[in-house]
Amino acid sequence: MRAPLDKLVKDKIEPTLERAGNEGAAKNALWFLFPKLISKEDVLFDRPNRDPADETLRVSNLLAGGRYFDLGAHRTRFSASALRKLLSDDDPKAQIAEAIRWIEDQPVTAREDLCQQMTEAISQGKFGANEPISKDWFDALAASWPYFHRVQDQSLIFISSWSDLISGSMRRGLEQLDADEASEILLGSIQNSQDVSVLAGLVRHFLGDVRENGATSRSALFTVHVFDFARDIRGAMLQRTQQLAETRKLWSQADPWELVWFWHQAIESDDVKKFLESEVQKDDAFEPIVRGAINRVFSSSGTYERVSPWTLNLFIDPTIYRVAAENRLSSNEEGIRSLASRFLSALEIGENETNRSETRHKPDLDRA
């Protein structure tokens, strides 16, 4: 009975593979999805010529998840020599900048795959196997992080965030160093990097938060003499964040909300709330503040946007946001009007979801 079934499967799948832009790539994708179609016992299709170690990838490799269902050919790719040059230790900041310029010169349709290839090469090829990071490499990744954060298409739910691949490389690289060396690299980058968004997240990862019920450290790197490291590193990050706020340059950072979260969790006072209450009234700050509060939700019922009233309330009374958005519904700028409308709709959805959740979990006093 098995042979006819094998033939039926093969007859059904082969025509689809032949129509693919690259039949070899299509068979490779099939192998990742359904490894038993290409097993030692029952070879329905030719086994792709892969290293045996790649057996461990398959569907468990989340970084490749976005390509499992892509049977087309990736026509624009980094060459092997270009990747070797990129991953060398010869002025990494210049090599990364050159690679990004080359990506930007390619057709728009090719850039997504090139960004994925480049960030995977750095994450897996350079810092995927206990590779310590140098100061030059750390500063180079910190400088490139804003680019990948800004160009990432957030609708690509099967593809790992490019900026997360970069920040993960920075984190893993530091964890291979001793605490003193890692602290020196991190402090230098905090003081000298133009954009410090990614560094705020790394500081919270390594040191946790000051506020009660805040995030705790997720690394043992600075366990020894933790108070000294926390004072120096968190203090430098806090000083840099407050300087950006005072000079009103915070909103030009790649991810200002990463800095807002750090700032709020690094102090016990209400300074952040006061700052946001003032800033949300200003036109140049309204857009980044409100845009950062809107979250995209992917669910079986569809994709939609929501604003969490609970999260907003950590920083500012949601009513202040609502009034600021309503005032801009009559703005002369279409983009501002559209954003204000999006925010109000997303906030309403968030409030309705919160109310339904509270209703479901409200105790039945009559039955108690």
Image (tube, helix red, strand yellow):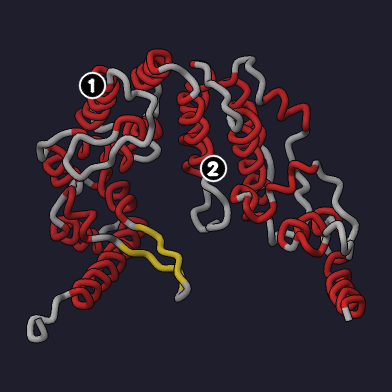
Rate crowding at label 1 as few (under 14), some (14 to 19) or many (20 or more) other CA atoms within 10 Å: few
The residue lying at 14 percent from left, 60 percent from top is 319
The residue at the point 22 percent across, 32 percent down is 245
Image coords of residue 296 (percent x, y): 40, 60
Which badge, 2 or 1, comes first in the chain's sequence? Answer: 2
Q: Which mark, residue 162?
A: 2
User: Which quadrant of the view contains residue 321?
Assistant: bottom left
In the image, taking residue 143 as reference, residue 48 lies left or right, namely: right
Q: Residue 264 in the image: x percent, y percent?
A: 20, 39
Direction bottom: furthest residue: 366
At 61% from the left and 30% from the top, the residue drawn is 129
Amino acid type of disc 2?
A: Trp
Identity, as a three-letter code, of the amino acid under mark 1: Phe
Q: Which residue is more in the foreground, 264 or 223?
A: 223
Question: Where's the C terminus, which quadrant?
Answer: bottom left
Mark whose residue sits in front, 2 or 1: 1
Mark 1: which secondary structure? helix
Residue 192, horizontal then vertical, whole percent: 38, 18
Point out the image quarter for the N terminus. Answer: bottom right
Q: Is residue 277 above or below residue 118?
A: below
Q: Of residues 122 and 243, which is closer to you in this image?
A: 122
Q: Residue beneath label 1, please?
A: 227
SS at mark 2?
A: helix
Residue 333 visible in the displayed image: no
